[in-house]
Image (cartoon, rainbow, N blue to C red):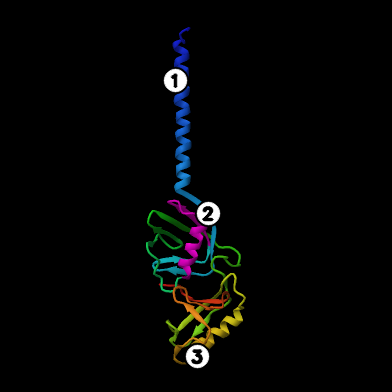
Amino acid sequence: MRPVPASRRRLAAAFSLALAGVLAVLALGGAASASAAGCPSFRVLHDDRIGAVVLPAGNYEVTVAGGLSCSASSKLFARFLSDWDGNLPKPWRATAEGSGKATFKGGAQSFSVRLAGGGGGGGNTEIGKLCPGTFTVNAGTDVGPLYFAKGPYLLYIPAQSGITCRRSSVLFTRFLAAPGGMLPDPWQVKTQTATFFKPAHPLRSAFRVEPANGVS
């Protein structure tokens, strides 16, 4: 066997080192992409808050990490926005990082949101349609297990509901006036999100109520 010249061995070694460097960069880039990835924007329909997190209306950039999918982060963000009492489900915690910017962590998984700007109207399929204007509760009233303090409220229509904004306003007025704070049969309410629904058609017959100033 003819020996390989030293110059050719050095060239081969240099090529191997360069290739290893390229592979390392690609691996790091892949790891970074896997650990933190950008998702489609999420629209917050009105000025809102989740505890100490202040979220002005607009389009938000969402970044996920820890293996959380974009779809899962969108559902979680919508759930946190619609939460009635502002207490996030364990193990999730919210950290405010300034107006329109926050990070939500749940164990190894997390996602961050940042206000990217305003935009046109419309709804968000995850949180439904926001009805125009506000509904005023004139005096603190119990409705089923929930207490609605005096002040302005917003009405939302979930994506699959057939109830109109006008109908939801009429129904909420009726619920507030019910004797003893009892919900008229067959209506029930999900206490976590203040969503009123009929058990026979929980998606088709539903609307949600939220304080106009957000949950503090």
Residue at coordinates 46% horizontally, 49% vertically from top-left?
36
**Residue found at x 46% / y 74%:** 213
Residue closer to the observer: 21 or 184? 184
Q: Disc 2 and disc 3: Cα gap in Å?
A: 44 Å
Q: Which of marks 2 and 3 is nearer the N terminus?
A: 2
In percent of width and height, residue 148 lies at 44, 82
Question: Is 96 displayed left or right of 57 in the figure?
Answer: left
CA gap between label 2 and label 1 equals 41 Å
Element assignment for label 3: helix
Type of the residue with mark 1: Ala
The span from disc 1 to disc 3 (Cα, nearest Å) is 84 Å
Vertical order, 77 against 131 (above or below): above
Of labels 2 and 1, earlier in sequence is 1
SS under mark 1 = helix
Residue 19 higher or lower than 202, as above or below: above
Which mark, residue 13?
A: 1
Which stretch appears magenta? Answer: 59-82
Q: Which mark is residue 140?
A: none
Instruction: Please state the horizontal and vertical placement of residue 153, each as a whole percent of the image.
Output: 50, 79
Among all residues in the image, which is located at the extreme front? Answer: 200
Residue type, mark 2 in image: Cys
Q: Is residue 28 above or below residue 133?
A: above
Whether residue 29 is situated above or below residue 108 in the rendered picture: above
The residue at the point 53 percent across, 84 percent down is: 186
Pointer 3 residue? 177
Query: Which numbered disc flags the more N-terminal residue, 1 or 3?
Result: 1
Q: Circle 3: is it few (<14), some (14-19), or many (20+) Cα within 10 Å? A: some
Query: Label 1: few (<14), some or many (≥20) within 10 Å?
Result: few
Is mark 2 in CB contact (under 8 Å) with mark 1?
no
Mark 3 residue type: Ala
Is 25 left or right of 169, judged from the image as shown? left
